[in-house]
Amino acid sequence: MSFYDSWSALMIGTIAGFILVFTALIAARIFGPFASERGKGVSYECGMLPIGSRWAQVNVRYYLIAILFLIFDVEAVFIFPWAVTFVRQAEEFGMFVFYEMLVFIAVLVLGLGYAWRRGVLEWK
């Protein structure tokens, strides 16, 4: 098996994907309805004109909670496949891989402890 045989399917799929995406974008630009009206420039399109200013202040705690959620969501994405692989091939990997995961979890727990100590998780 040569280099070109192993990568040819990937190249064909990539080229076909680019062609399909660009064809869809061009077709949407050509055939799509485009109307410029006053309502399109409104910041919130719900059928009613907004009352007051467009600018609204959002508390930074919402962003911190979202970031914490993403951190622990990514943790779950890493831990579940690791656990399945580790259980099936524990003797091949040894305890080094187990300790690496403990360090990973410890870093996340430290981050959660820091956020808790700073009061990010308290709703006021």
Image (cartoon, rainbow, N blue to C red):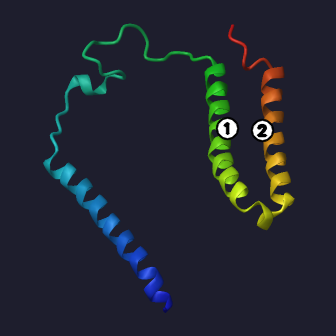
The answer to the question of whether label 2 and label 1 lie on touching residues, with beta carbons closer than 8 A, is: yes
Of residue 11 and residue 55, the one placed in the foreground of this image is 11
Position of 90 relative to 37 (above/below): below
Q: Which residue has dot 2 on it?
A: 108
Apparent side of residue 105 relative to residue 71 in the rendered image (left or right):
right
Q: Which residue has dot 1 on it?
A: 71
Looking at the rendered structure, the secondary structure element under dot 1 is helix
- Residue at 65% from the left image edge and 41% from the top image edge: 76
Q: Residues within 10 Å of mark 1 (few under 14, many from 20)?
A: some
Q: Position of residue 1 (x, y in %)?
A: 49, 91
Q: Position of residue 15 (x, y in %)?
A: 35, 71
Q: Residue furthest bottom?
A: 2
Q: Which numbered disc flags the more N-terminal residue, 2 or 1?
A: 1
What kind of residue is marked 1? Ile
Apparent side of residue 59 relative to residue 38 in the rendered image (left or right):
right
- Residue at 71% from the left image edge and 55% from the top image edge: 87
What kind of residue is marked 2? Leu
Of residue 90 and residue 33, the one placed in the foreground of this image is 90
Q: Identify the image quadrant of the C terminus.
A: top right
- Residue at 27% from the left image edge and 12% from the top image edge: 48
